[in-house]
């Protein structure tokens, strides 16, 4: 399935009654988690989800249906693959759903047993791994079964209470410019469904203060926006300090799009931009899409590691082998950022499950960081490695 990126498109509503492969998941099924609210084992399995975004929820019934994917392996002919998946069909939506969030649904990619990669791996269709590549022009790809590139960087996933229930990694320090800040070690949720990034309060304060010291631009105050915003000439934009996440074993992750540029100001003499990071009351961070762009990110659930390599997400041929040799877009020696042309995340991108955003999160952020999920699928191409 795919989407045209530069034009509006009609979105068809999913109706189980119009699908000849759809069926209710019965309450007696092992994947129905709410047996206690069912009257009988043959009744339709219900679901109800309350999101961390204010007053946002979804409820309905669970269905089983077929997902059509394109096989794109090096030694496989390109054809359609049908896979059985579990999905929720919403009957009642509240909050951000009613304001345009997730117009064509959300796609679960987590470690849980009913997420799409879990079901595909259990069916023997793929390796228990997948990759996501967010391009800077707001498009991207998902490759199910992809275990990445031979030259990729990696860091292990960390368990929560002894279980790998989320994609958590350990960040050793947050680096601004050439300075890696002291006492900025934290755990982070790699959250592909979050539009923007949230940092623990103490880490946030250290990062934004150091960024403000190094940035060569005039500080301004904007209503309903992030805390640190600036007015800069085009020359000043080039002087923005790079941001890096430092992991164990000297693995570093350069953030390709560290700023959010106000599109309305780009035709003017001065450009308004913000550091699109918010504080969180939780002890761990949520690394959102704005910090994930420009990389082939591999969620290797089989080997319990998160990997990344600089990539041209539009080059379909570069994804033809799960573990190919030679990068089509290797990191340059100086790891130059691409922020002079930075753009915002599409406003209909889904928000994050946890950590929860601060209660003081500005309206502009919450409108873009719209609702909890794992991934919005409307701007992505999906493939399957066989």
Image (cartoon, rainbow, N blue to C red):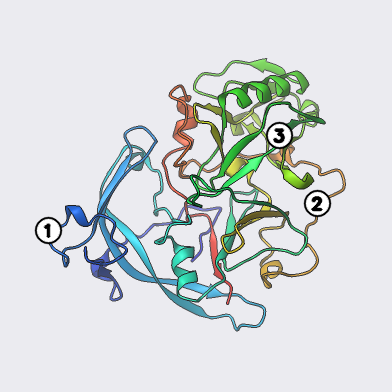
Distance in Å between CA atoms under marks 2 and 3: 21 Å
Query: In this rendering, would 71 be left or right of 103?
Result: right
Where does the image place residue 274, in percent across and percent down from the top left?
63, 27
Residue at 23 percent of width and 68 percent of height:
17
Distance in Å between CA atoms under marks 1 and 3: 52 Å
Query: In this rendering, would 361 be left or right of 277?
Result: left
Where does the image place residue 232, in percent across and percent down from the top left?
72, 23
Q: Quick check: marks 1 and 3 in contact, CB under 8 Å?
A: no
The residue that mark 2 highlights is 331
Question: Could you tell which of marks 2 and 3 lies nearer the N-terminus?
Answer: 3
Q: Nearer the viewer, mark 1 or mark 2?
A: 1
Disc number placed over residue 39 in the picture, else none: 1
Distance in Å between CA atoms under marks 1 and 2: 57 Å
Where does the image place residue 259, in percent across and percent down from the top left?
66, 33
Which is more toward the observer, 369 or 324? Answer: 324
Residue at 32 percent of width and 37 percent of height:
95
State whether residue 22 appears in this view.
Answer: yes
The residue that mark 3 highlights is 173
Q: What element carries label 3?
A: strand
Which is more toward the observer, 307 or 58? Answer: 307
State whether residue 252 appears in this view.
Answer: no
Question: Could you tell which of marks 1 and 3 lies nearer the N-terminus?
Answer: 1
Of all residues, the one furthest to the front in this rendering is 162
Q: How crowded is mark 1: few (under 14 residues within 10 Å), some or many (20 or more)?
A: few
Q: Residues within 10 Å of mark 2 (few under 14, many from 20)?
A: few
Q: Residues within 10 Å of mark 3 (few under 14, many from 20)?
A: many
């Amino acid at each position: 399935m795919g989407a045209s990126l530069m034009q509006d498109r009609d979105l068809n509503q999913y109706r189980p009654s119009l699908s000849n492969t759809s069926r209710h998941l019965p309450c007696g099924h092992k994947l129905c988690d709410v047996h206690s609210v069912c009257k009988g084992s043959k009744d339709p399995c219900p679901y109800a989800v309350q999101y961390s975004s204010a007053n946002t929820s979804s409820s309905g019934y669970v269905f089983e249906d077929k997902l059509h994917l394109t096989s794109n392996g090096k030694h496989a002919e390109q054809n359609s693959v049908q896979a059985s998946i579990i999905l929720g069909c919403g009957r009642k939506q509240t909050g951000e759903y009613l304001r345009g969030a997730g117009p064509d649904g959300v796609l679960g990619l987590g470690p849980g047993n009913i997420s799409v990669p879990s079901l595909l791996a259990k069916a023997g269709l793929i390796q228990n791994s997948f990759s996501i590549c967010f391009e800077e022009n707001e498009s991207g790809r998902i490759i199910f079964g992809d275990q990445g590139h031979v030259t990729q960087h990696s860091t292990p996933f960390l368990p929560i209470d002894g279980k790998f229930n989320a994609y958590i990694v350990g960040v050793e320090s947050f680096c601004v410019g050439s300075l890696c800040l002291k006492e900025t070690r934290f755990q982070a949720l790699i959250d592909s469904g979050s539009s923007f990034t949230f940092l623990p309060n103490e880490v946030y304060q250290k990062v934004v203060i150091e960024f403000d010291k190094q940035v060569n631009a005039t500080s301004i105050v904007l209503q309903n926006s992030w805390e640190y915003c600036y007015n800069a000439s085009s020359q000043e934009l080039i002087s923005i300090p790079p941001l890096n996440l430092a992991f164990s074993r000297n693995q570093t992750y350069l953030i390709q799009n560290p700023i959010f540029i106000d599109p309305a100001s780009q035709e003017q003499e001065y450009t308004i931009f913000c550091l699109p990071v918010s504080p969180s009351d939780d002890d761990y961070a949520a690394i959102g899409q704005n910090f994930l762009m420009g990389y082939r990110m591999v969620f290797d659930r089989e080997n319990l590691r998160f990997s990344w390599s600089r990539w041209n997400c539009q080059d379909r041929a570069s994804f033809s082998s799960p573990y190919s040799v030679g990068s089509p877009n290797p990191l340059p020696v100086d790891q130059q950022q691409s922020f002079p042309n930075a753009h915002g995340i599409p406003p209909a991108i889904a928000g994050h499950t946890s950590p929860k955003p601060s209660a003081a999160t500005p309206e502009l952020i919450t409108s873009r960081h719209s609702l909890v999920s794992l991934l919005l699928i409307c701007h992505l191409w999906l493939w399957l490695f066989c």
